[in-house]
Image (cartoon, rainbow, N blue to C red):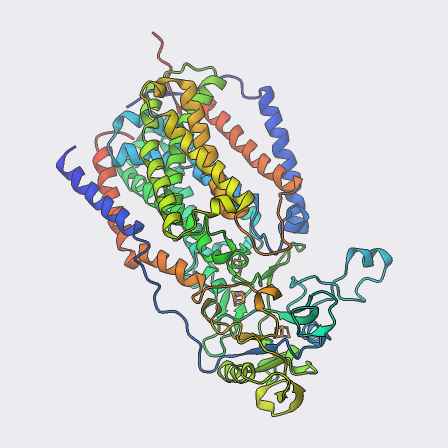
Amino acid sequence: MHEKQALGGRLLTKPFWVLLGLAMIAGLLLIKRFLFGIGAVTNLSDGYPWGIWIVYDVLVGTALGCGGYSIALLVYIFNKGEYHPLVRSALMTSAFGYTLAGVSIFIDIGRYWQMYNVFLPWHINLNSIMFEVAACIGAYVFVLWIEFSPTFLEHRKSLETKKKLSKVLFLFIALGVLLPTMHQSSLGSLMIIAGEKLSPMWQTGWLPLLFLMTAITMGYAVVIFESLFSAVALKRPLDETPILGKLSVMMIPLLVLFLLLRFGDLMWRGQLGNIFNDGMLGAFFIVENVLFLIPIIMLASAKNRMKPTILFWSAGSMILAGALYRFDTFLVAFNPGVGYHYFPSASEILITVGIISIEIMAYLIFVKKLPVLPAIKHS
Amino acid sequence: MNLERRDFLKVLSAGALTAGNVTSVFAGIRKTLSADAVGILYDGTICIGCKACEAACKQYNGMPPESANLEKATGVDGIWDESYDLSEKTLNKIKLYEHGDASTHNSVENGFAFVKKACMHCVDPDCVSACPVTALVKDDATGIVEYDKDACIGCRYCMVACPYNVPKFEYAEAIPEIVKCELCNHRQAEGDIPACCEFCPTGASLFGKVTDLLEEAHKRIKLVAGSTYEYPMRSLDEGDVSPKTVAPYINYIYGEKEGGGTQYLLLSAIPFTKLGLPELSATSSASKSEGIQHGIYKGMIAPIALLGGLLYGAYQTTKNSEG
Ligand code: SF4
Ligand code: SF4
Ligand code: SF4
């Protein structure tokens, strides 16, 4: 058992007020959305029915929420106990990321009051990738909070309940690996049905595997990025660098496999040449893959992996790469035909910013009030 | 690594292999045209662009005219219908092809021609496959793709999926719906034919059984340009005809094969790609996406095997700790 402690300290700092302000702006805009419809606040159109609420909040948001999944995979499934100190904060970020993705879906869908139809057996459509994604994400939000609940129970000193829970926790841990495996791959499968509307550089039957691989890698990158960032921002010692360095190795084989599969598939389908013929799209494709390459190169040597700055930037590059890959697949390389354009409106962006602010506020409240982060060892 | 864990990893990798084995998965049996399927044959060569079908469609489907902002400013809102394309207020749309001085009907060079956009009522519709809550359903007998607002959650995946961008969403409504042509099923229920066919003055929009319409279409593309042909009016069953001079048809029936076929078929003298119709493969995208999805989740064997392995692994790891 690793010692965890609440950070304590003042909650209502200046940055916190700024975040609160941003969240309130988003709140006001949301009132507008619910009173006057989605068109009143977004630039969505008949050609581009999905915008940043889906692509950032849901696709990138849940991939960033894969920390809990990726670490659980290592600790519980591959029995790498040494990563256990990272589990709790990773689970917390995942719980936030997924919960807010759920909230975003609620905001984005037009007939939200009927959302529960996704869970009614006489309505569900087993052929629909969207059904699988919705049902799995819904279930996983629940599983994540159960997985994270020992932290609350510790805080409230309900040790009896915690003991009981720990007997069945393995059930939730197993589900906590199965569900993201299913829906992170299916998030990629979503675009297969878009067929010819998605550029052949991105459209492939391998989308599910490519999305799954990048989701797991993004999970590791987020854990590294967040640990280092919060250490600096919350003025904690960089104690975790060695274990983060070790963790960063996990990204390399996954990324190499990803690139091999991606380029192999392009070659197989004879689409490799498009990279240089397709102007703007080609440029996006190249930037994306360079961002995937950076962590491989930067983390190749063991010495580099011990340097917090290198770890930080390679994790950052990985996060950007995965995010751009998702943006490209769902928006940039998606072309519904002439006459349609999409760029998010100010209100749309502000609502997303508000949601991110809520996430950061929740993070601050949690680490300050609950035993999430590893206790600082005083020597 | 102990022995059990190694066995477990084997299970895990078997699961991963099944999941990854996407290229070897073949799409199952797909939907085929039902014997009683009904549809529309739109012959662009005899369409005169009068938009009677558009007006009739609006009238019989309770759709308001659309107006441009300029009109609204001048206070004559709603006098002229101004929609640019299909929209949440426009279920069908006549569009104009123009080239050069646009002097000759049905000519690619210096010519003009019309094309009518509407739901294609695909034989194997992507929108139906995409909808998570079965709000879009293809009728087993008529093949009409219908919408049920009480099921719909408004996720707009159908719009992403449809290769023709047909389903439209009411972005300006607090309580929005998806809107698309349902082949005037409310009129058909009363023994009438779709409004756009009933009120077409030339027979360019022709209603009928899809098998009969296909036969008619094949007959037309073999006609000699310049000869006279008795074009059926409104509905194939009605027997009313109107003689017209035959245009130089493109030797192709759009919709016979596209994405597994459609029940709305088009003929033209102008290449279809120039009319804004997409080039699609002969199988639906739904067949690919479902093929991969059902390949991965075949009988739920892979997920259950994976879950079994995961339960075992998680149990072994947590049994001695407090989590
Ligand atoms: S044209 Fe689009 S909306 Fe109509 S049936 Fe086909 S996929 Fe569905
Ligand atoms: S918007 Fe409605 S009809 Fe379209 S896929 Fe979603 S639930 Fe189905
Ligand atoms: S069948 Fe009816 S709803 Fe569809 S385009 Fe024709 S008139 Fe409009």
User: Is residue A8 toward the left or the right of residue A247 in the image?
Assistant: right
Name the residue at the top extreme.
A379
Image position of B118 with respect to A190: above or below: below
Residue A155 position in % (x across, y down): 40, 26
Can see residue A209?
Answer: yes
Q: Nearer the viewer, residue B280 or A245?
A: B280
Residue A71 in percent (x, y) is at 33, 32
State the residue lying farthest toward the left.
B3
A212 displayed left or right of B322: right
- Which residue is depicted at the point 50% across and 58% down? B161
Quarter holding the N terminus of chain B is top left
Between B160 and B139, which is closer to the camera in this rendering?
Answer: B160
Q: Nearer the viewer, residue A281 or B6?
A: A281
**Relative to residue A278, is residue A42 drawn left or right?**
right
**Number of numbered discs overlaid on the protein picture:** 0
Furthest toward the front, the residue is: B109
Ligand 3 quadrant in view? bottom right
In x, y percent, where is residue B227? Answer: 63, 88
Report whether residue B55 is seen.
no
Residue at the far right in the pictured view:
B74
Is the C terminus of chain B in the top left, top right, bottom left or bottom right quadrant?
top left
Q: Position of residue A198 (x, y in %)?
A: 50, 52
Q: Which residue is at a point 65% across and 42% down the rendered structure image?
A: A345
